[in-house]
Amino acid sequence: MKVRNTFIIFLVSGFWHGAEWTFIVWGALHATFYLPLLLIGQNRRHLAVVAQGSLLPTVRELLQMALTFTLVCVAWIFFRAENMPAAIDYLAGMVGSGPAHPAVVSLGGLVFLLPFFVVVEWLGREQRYALETLGHRLPRLVRWSAYAGLVFLIGLFMGTEKIPFIYFQF
């Protein structure tokens, strides 16, 4: 009963976003990723802050976070793809067995931004807003210089093509 209801909720969530197979696959993937924890009764186990009170996560926690992040990102490819062939081509381009998608090639800029965001989120994980909380510990000049630098880096690596807000298509 729980498995059926979980699948229904995730599939309806996908269908709510649109009557395209990509949204249905997005919902089905999230349901599939959630099922192992549900089946072994561990779905309510991981509600606390990861590595609370610790400076660094354990290797196991680090691997769990990386796996979760990877699976969710793969599912979001289907959410953003125009159709199923486009999603499959995108995935193939990511693993090097298909044509490189322009968005995959532009991910090189994330090499500079991703470590910053990971560190900020990790250090502020026990607070409500990580960046705001960490920023208040710094002098105002340093804080605002960091904010300006962050805005500059985001602008430097963002694409220049006009991309409409995703929910305008619904």
Image (cartoon, rainbow, N blue to C red):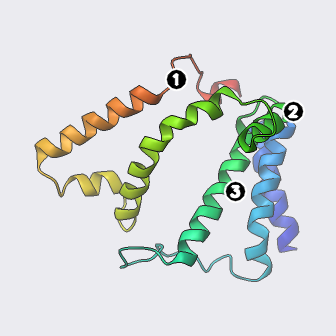
Identified at 61% across, 80% down, the residue is 45
Asked whether the viewer can see residue 15, the reply is: no
The quadrant of the rendering that contains the C terminus is top right
Q: Quadrant of residue 101?
A: top right
Which residue has dot 1 on it? 159
Q: Which residue has dot 3 on it?
A: 71
| Residue type indicated by callout 3 | Leu
Residue 24 appears left or right of 95:
right
Identify the mark nearer the N-term, 2 or 3: 3
How far across and down, in percent of the image, does residue 55 sit? 35, 74
Q: Amino acid at mark 2?
A: Pro
Mark 1: secondary structure? loop
The amino acid pointed to by label 1 is Gly
124 in relation to 94, above or below: below
Location of residue 93 (image quadrant): top right
Closest to the observer: 31 or 50? 50
Name the residue: 11% across, 50% down: 139
**Quick check: marks 2 and 3 in contact, CB under 8 Å?**
no
Q: Residues within 10 Å of mark 3 (few under 14, many from 20)?
A: few
- Which residue carries the number 2 mark? 85
Q: Percent from the top left, x then y, of residue 128?
A: 37, 60
User: Of callouts 2 and 1, which one flags the residue occurring earlier in the amino acid sequence?
Assistant: 2
Q: Nearer the viewer, residue 82 or 152?
A: 152
